[in-house]
Image (cartoon, grey):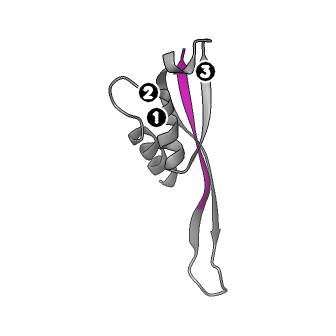
Amino acid sequence: MAALGSAGLAVAAVPTGPSNVTTTINGLKAHGFDVIVNRVGTAPLSECTVGAVRPGHQVTRTDSGFPGDSLTTAVISKTVYVDLAC
């Protein structure tokens, strides 16, 4: 379920309407994502559009802290892929 929640956040961070690539990438980074850009074409970044934002790998750690404590899970890192058409 946690992976689906992260994917929803990634999609929610994408602005609607004409997409500004820099705004999209910076927004995702501000939400804690490691962003991997897949770019098709050689036009300048200012002429690119976001085709998709796809969920990537999420790394979590589960531990109890102290013996007898309940288990807690923490997200260590989360990745999204941003597809650009240039």
Residue at image position (58%, 64%) is: 74
| Image marks 2 and 1: residues in contact by CB distance under 8 Å | yes
Q: Which mark is residue 20?
A: 2
Mark 3 crowdedness (10 Å alpha carbons): few <14, some 14-19, many ≥20: some
**Which residue is denoted by mark 3 in the rendering?**
39
Tell me, yes or no, if residue 48 can be seen here: no
- Residue placed furthest toward the left: 17
Examine the structure image and report whether residue 10 is included in the region drawn in magenta. Answer: no
Camera-side residue: 47 or 68? 47
**Which residue is denoted by mark 1 in the rendering?**
23
Mark 1 crowdedness (10 Å alpha carbons): few <14, some 14-19, many ≥20: few
Name the front one of labels 3 and 2: 2
Residue 78 in the image, given as x and y percentages of width and height = 59, 49
Q: Amino acid at mark 3?
A: Arg
Q: Amino acid at mark 2?
A: Asn
Residue at image position (54%, 25%) is: 83
Residue 57 in the image, given as x and y percentages of width and height = 62, 44
Q: Amino acid at mark 1?
A: Thr
Q: Which residues are magenta?
A: 75-86
- Residue placed furthest toward the bottom: 68
* Gap between marks 2 and 1 measured at Cα: 5 Å
* Gap between marks 3 and 1 measured at Cα: 16 Å
* Gap between marks 3 and 2 measured at Cα: 14 Å
